[in-house]
Amino acid sequence: MLLLLDLLCVAGVGWAAALIGGLFAGVRLLPTAVAVIVAAVLVLPGFTAGLITNRRIVRGRKPQSGWIRTVWAPPELPHWGLVLSGLLLLAFWVAGMTAFAGMSVNVPARDSAAQERLIGYQQRFALGMLGGLGVGGSTLAAASLLRERRALRTG
């Protein structure tokens, strides 16, 4: 099940990347509502699964707070995988933040080209944030899958 959610998350990252690429090229391929809802449906379940499966039961020395029973574990992936994830996350962050900067410009009500650019900025911002979540979710899910595979080999 985790593999399926990870693949959906990767598909969501690809979806967001393709639509952001179109926006950078000056073409809005889909209405914002459709683009963002589809990206969210693809990304958020995998992100949640990756986050949940990276919790570990506290063993050995107990934390100072008695109610903490699990801790989040950083992903254990090969260095190339972590570097690739970091670069993709940076790319989505830059796409989202440059769109955010573009949204702060005042747009005249009668300027339809400026209104269209503003809608493109809004779509790019939302897709950039969802793409970044997707990269993080797929990285965490891949780390969980790798950890499970190693546990099966050794035990």
Image: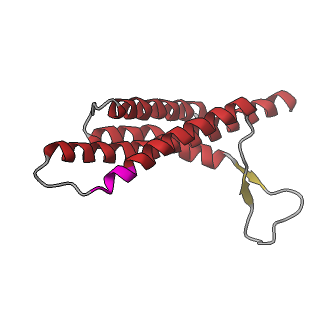
Q: Which residue lies at the image location 21% right of the left edge and 43% below the top edge?
A: 116
Magenta stretch contains residue 101: yes
Q: Position of residue 39 (x, y in %)?
A: 40, 39
Q: Is residue 41 left or right of residue 104?
A: right
- Can residue 16 be seen here? The reply is yes
Q: Position of residue 53 (x, y in %)?
A: 66, 45
Q: Is residue 41 left or right of residue 4?
A: left
For this rendering, which residue is in front, 128 or 51?
Answer: 128
For this rendering, which residue is in front, 81 or 107?
Answer: 107
Please state the extent of the stretch shown in magenta in the rendering.
100-105
Q: Position of residue 101 (x, y in %)?
A: 38, 52
Q: How many numbered discs, if any?
A: 0
Q: Which residue lies at the image location 62% right of the left edge and 49% below the top edge?
A: 52
- Can residue 45 be seen here? The reply is no
Q: Position of residue 3 (x, y in %)?
A: 59, 31
Q: Seen from this angle, which residue lies furthest bottom?
A: 65
- Quarter of the rendering containing residue 109: bottom left
Q: Which residue lies at the image location 37% right of the left edge and 42% below the top edge?
A: 124
- Which quarter of the rendered picture does the C terminus lie within? top right
Q: Seen from this angle, which residue lies furthest left?
A: 110
